Amino acid sequence: RARESVGVLEKGDRTPVTVADFACQAVLAAALCTGSGDTHPALSLVAEEGADTLRLPASEALACAVAEEANAALRELGEPELSVSAALDAIDLGAPTERGKPVEGARWILDPIDGTAGFLRGCGAQYVIGLALIGGEGEPLLGYMGMPGLEVEPTSTWEPLDPAASAGGAVGTMGVMLASRRGHGCTAHALHSTGGAWRVCVSSTKVLADGVVAISDHETPTWALPGGALPLLRRQCCGSLCKYALVAMGAADAFFQHPVGWASKLKTWDHAAGVACVEAAGGRVTGFAEEDRLAPQLVGSCADDALSEGLLVGREMYPARGGVCVSNGAVHTEALRAVNAALDASAEGTREVLPAPAGLLMVDRDGTINRDVGSPGVVRAGDLQLIPGAAQALKLANDAGWAVCVVTNQSCVGKGLLSERELEEIHDRLRELLHEASGAHIDEVIFSTETAASATSRRKPSPRMLEEAITQFAIPRSRAVYVGDTHTDMLAARHAGVAGHLVTTGYGRAAGEAARAVGMELPCTADAAVPLGLPVE
């Protein structure tokens, strides 16, 4: 039913988030974080979503939809309902409260919907509700993966907990729940009224060439076994947890999550429940090195101290060589050998030595990097003209080790004046111009295509896009700045809690002229400019 609910947002990594993601997190957070003394103490929660966007005035309808979806589930459970405010507060129980501050002791780690794209797609695509209880040293204590759409046949290695109830049929005719407990194994439970339950374990495959490797439905393997052969591939959409589940149940023997570099570190919630279930079922989960067990990294350990500096502790990981290897254990060494050989033979193999950025320079586009051509804006790559000195300024940031991220409103897409593909072509041309002018480069472009009338807008002055950039690059707010040419840019910076710098190009030209007219030396602080009535608040 939630798939039919109105309201889909897009995050900085271009993945969707729905009413169902928010509602699921609200329900589970409210339950998990309510303690009752020594017998059931409240534990900390680390979860994927935050309610910042839902608290914006423009998102009132979406926030109400989230609360209603959460309350529909609570009514079915016979639990008290949540007000809109209480639902948003519950969601934020899993959001970071202070960047870089470790969560002490045991904590729940929740991915309300892993594979939101699969949830939206339906038609056999998978999604997983993943929850794990992780001890203070990183030991997985409990793991749960709910997969409403998964169909999988019990294998000969599955042990029925109740032979009568578990006889015949696919465990996932109407979905399956995996549950694990440290030291007690992993069980699969059919999510329908007559379904049974089984104790499951990883496969007994000894040689990878005889096995099955789970991969994404869009993935092309970059690795191979000696001689160029590949094992049988099982394509599975969407997200990583559904592939962990296949390994835990013995339906696949391995899967790899490939390196993505320091700008997109791995999120703990994408792995915690999977690690718990696979290890309990007898499998192994490491980075791309034998000794680099992933579980301790769920609470903040990192294989490389240099890379750990910018991590959001307990929320992000950077395992050995930036990737993850999940297997039945028996084929683990062979699997690592195959994927590392591919990395060694490509530029991907150098990603683990990239330093974390020294800081994050977020910068507006039109009027700040390139000339603002007026309404309707830059709608063709040929319209781009760099502002003198902009490329050189970005090169200084590059040379200082700062990541550079363009954050820009592009309502021309929402108005139908150009497509997202055409917008990407404009950004490709911008990169070319910057490189030609000074050798400067941009690490990322985050944009909003919504118009000012959009009900769920991420556009500035909302801080949403800036927050996405800060999270993506794992930079403390104290080492992040935003540069733009409008009052809107400065408001976005203020709302995001970062330093804002107004340039005197584009719409900032009037502010510069006013400052120069009274003999003010630039650059100047916002406090110094207040008497002029400049748009710096």
Image (cartoon, rainbow, N blue to C red):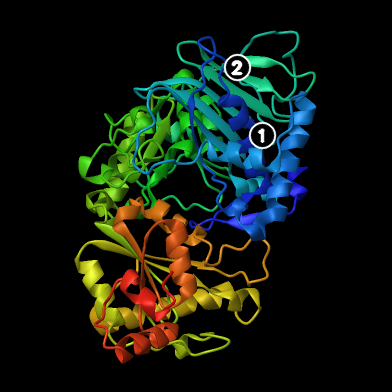
Disc 2 to disc 1, C-alpha distance: 19 Å
Looking at the rendered structure, which numbered label has been put on residue 150? 1
Q: Quadrant location of the C terminus?
A: bottom left
- As helix, strand or loop, the secondary structure at mark 1 comes to loop
Looking at the rendered structure, which numbered label has been put on residue 156? 2
Spot occupied by residue 25 in the image (x, y as percentages of width and height): 60, 37
Spot occupied by residue 42 in the image (x, y as percentages of width and height): 52, 21
Residue nearest the viewer, comparing 111 with 185 = 111
| Foreground label between 2 and 1 | 1
- Contact, CB < 8 Å: mark 2 with mark 1? no
- As helix, strand or loop, the secondary structure at mark 2 comes to loop
Q: Residue at x 34, y 28 (%)?
A: 296
Spot occupied by residue 37 in the image (x, y as percentages of width and height): 53, 13
Residue nearest the viewer, comparing 530 with 299 = 530
Pick whichever of labels 2 and 1 is earlier in the sequence: 1
Q: Residue at x 65, y 42 (%)?
A: 85
Residue nearest the viewer, comparing 352 with 464 = 464
